């Protein structure tokens, strides 16, 4: 407890009184001008483009597989003789177990790399998508979707790392927003192929799942062709060099030291940042709730309550996801100028204001409100990217909406006699509450200062400078450990004496004690 207090994780009443007003002053935009996005895009080399695209496409198809259930909820319920609220558990168990996959994959990818974990998860996608289409009752279907949830969470971490960690610093703002909206692109593609396959093929909803098993084969081949990320190779070399250094000090008595060093680093990182970790879980519960609460049950609302046909449901969904893609990329880019918290708060205000139009309109004019609501749903995600445990906390969003919505019966469908429920009322109330929740916690939360951003950017630029000089990834990693060892103790420094490590020209010295 004493260490946490020294780190400032526990505050006196006076400190809290100073902190809250500071939440207003820290909303001031951190920069005086924006970087030209075309300049950012042109700065990427072929390796960076390839890594970004394979990570982005893998995440997009991850989302495609997830939204097959959302789009086919009505058809699956009818086939299994169940209510939509029963089948919506296929969404809930997927989201609940994403966190399990993320914890497993995150630990393994930090230890062993991103490449083969991505390949393994993509292969399991093929198996589980095929299996989903062959299920004939709800029990096996839910079991398969639970396993799929583990794989879905397991893919995101390696895919995000592959896409983003080798990019130049200035590209990460706009690229992280674009990467996140691979999720929207996956939803968009799922909606398009839903219309192409489900109403037109003899196997209906099963065809969409079977189709989803095909593209991962191409993604696996592409990922196998590409190398491990540069960032991981540096970290791996640094960890191995640190392990060798410690072994030499203990005359080789430190058996199993590489694994112990990794576990020690992970444990230290959690102990030093556990309050921020808890805050992020609380915050990301709201982010995931607004995403899943506005999207997962919405096709069912359009088809069952409003009576939209397959084509109009598809058009509405596609327009909404185009809005999410544009919103995430645009606000993610502007957040580097306006600040992340201010950008997200503005998105919350506008997103909450549009909720009535999102739920109350009953004609095709609804499509415009869907576009703008999803613009701000995507926009609030643009400046941020970390959320698996938030998914666990928000996993029941669609099931809650469906279950409560079925308490509000409407007149049966005049053409088919099928039961109809007021899902729109519940979705609208849920979204209004979640937008307010996000606004509150974003306002009270921390944000990096511009000096911290500049320091991080300088570290990345220094790394890129060493690469430009021809220093290998292994040499950079080993060089970091060599310089960290100063006066018998480890100190946080950037690479100093590359000449002693690689025999090449000595790099610029900069020490951060």
Image (cartoon, grey):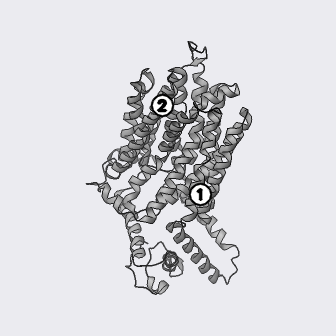
Q: Nearer the viewer, residue 173 or 2?
A: 173
At 35% from the left edge and 49% from the top edge, which residue is drawn?
A: 335
As displayed, is residue 73 above or below residue 46?
above
Q: Which mark is residue 154?
A: none
At 57% from the left edge and 55% from the top edge, which residue is drawn?
A: 218
Q: For mark 1, does the 10 Å Cα neighbourhood hold few (<14), some (14 to 19), or many (20 or more) residues?
A: many
Q: Which mark is residue 220?
A: 1
As displayed, is residue 332 above or below residue 481?
above
At 54% from the left edge and 81% from the top edge, which residue is drawn?
A: 488
Of the residues tagged 2 and 1, which is closer to the observer?
1
Q: Which mark is residue 431?
A: 2
Instruction: Pick whichever of labels 2 and 1 is earlier in the sequence.
Output: 1
Left or right of 169, for residue 394? right
Q: For mark 2, does the 10 Å Cα neighbourhood hold few (<14), some (14 to 19), or many (20 or more) residues?
A: many
Could you tell me residue 14's position as x and y percent? 41, 48
Could you tell me residue 433's position as x and y percent? 48, 31
Callout 2: SS: helix
């Amino acid at each position: 407890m004493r260490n946490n207090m020294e780190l400032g994780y526990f505050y006196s009443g006076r400190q809290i009184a100073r902190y809250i007003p500071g939440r207003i002053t820290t909303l001031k935009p951190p920069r005086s001008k924006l970087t030209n996005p075309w300049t950012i895009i042109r700065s990427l080399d072929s390796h960076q483009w390839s890594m970004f695209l394979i990570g982005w496409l893998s995440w997009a198809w991850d989302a495609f597989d997830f939204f097959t259930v959302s789009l086919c909820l009505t058809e699956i319920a009818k086939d299994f003789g169940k209510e939509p609220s029963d089948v919506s558990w296929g969404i809930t168990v997927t989201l609940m177990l994403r966190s399990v996959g993320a914890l497993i994959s995150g630990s393994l990818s930090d230890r062993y790399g991103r490449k083969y974990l991505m390949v393994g998860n993509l292969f399991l996608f093929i198996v589980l998508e095929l299996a989903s289409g062959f299920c004939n009752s709800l029990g096996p279907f839910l079991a398969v979707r639970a396993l799929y949830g583990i794989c879905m969470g397991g893919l995101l971490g390696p895919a995000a790392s592959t896409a983003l960690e080798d990019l130049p610093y200035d590209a990460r703002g706009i690229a992280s927003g674009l990467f996140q909206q691979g999720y929207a692109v996956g939803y968009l593609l799922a909606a398009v192929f839903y219309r192409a396959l489900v109403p037109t093929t003899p196997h209906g909803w099963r065809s969409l799942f079977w189709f989803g098993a095909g593209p991962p084969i191409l993604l696996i081949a592409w990922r196998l062709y590409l190398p491990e990320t540069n960032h991981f190779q540096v970290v791996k070399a640094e960890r191995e060099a640190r392990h060798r250094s410690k072994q030499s000090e203990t005359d080789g008595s430190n058996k199993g030291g590489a694994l112990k060093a990794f576990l020690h680093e992970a444990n230290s990182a959690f102990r030093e940042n556990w309050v921020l970790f808890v805050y992020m879980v609380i915050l990301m519960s709201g982010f995931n709730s607004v995403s899943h609460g506005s999207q997962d049950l919405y096709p069912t609302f359009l088809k069952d309550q409003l009576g939209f046909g397959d084509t109009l449901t598809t058009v509405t969904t596609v327009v909404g996801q185009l809005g999410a893609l544009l919103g995430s990329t645009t606000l993610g880019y502007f957040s580097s100028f306006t600040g992340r918290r201010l950008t997200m708060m503005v998105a919350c205000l506008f997103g909450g204001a549009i909720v009535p139009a999102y739920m109350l309109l009953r004609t095709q004019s609804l499509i415009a409100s869907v576009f703008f609501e999803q613009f701000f749903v995507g926009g609030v995600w643009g400046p941020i990217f970390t959320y698996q445990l938030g998914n666990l906390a928000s996993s029941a969003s669609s099931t809650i909406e469906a279950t409560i919505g079925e308490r509000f019966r409407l007149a049966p469908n005049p053409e088919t006699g099928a039961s109809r429920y007021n899902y729109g009322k519940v979705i609208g109330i849920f979204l209004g509450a979640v937008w307010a929740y996000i606004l509150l916690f974003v306002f009270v939360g921390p944000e990096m200062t511009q000096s911290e951003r500049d320091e991080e950017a300088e570290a990345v630029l220094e790394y890129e400078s060493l690469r430009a000089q021809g220093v290998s990834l292994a040499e950079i990693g080993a060089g970091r450990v060599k310089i960290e060892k100063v006066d018998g103790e480890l100190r946080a420094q950037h690479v100093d004496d590359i000449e002693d490590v690689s025999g090449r020209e000595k790099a610029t010295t900069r020490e951060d004690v």
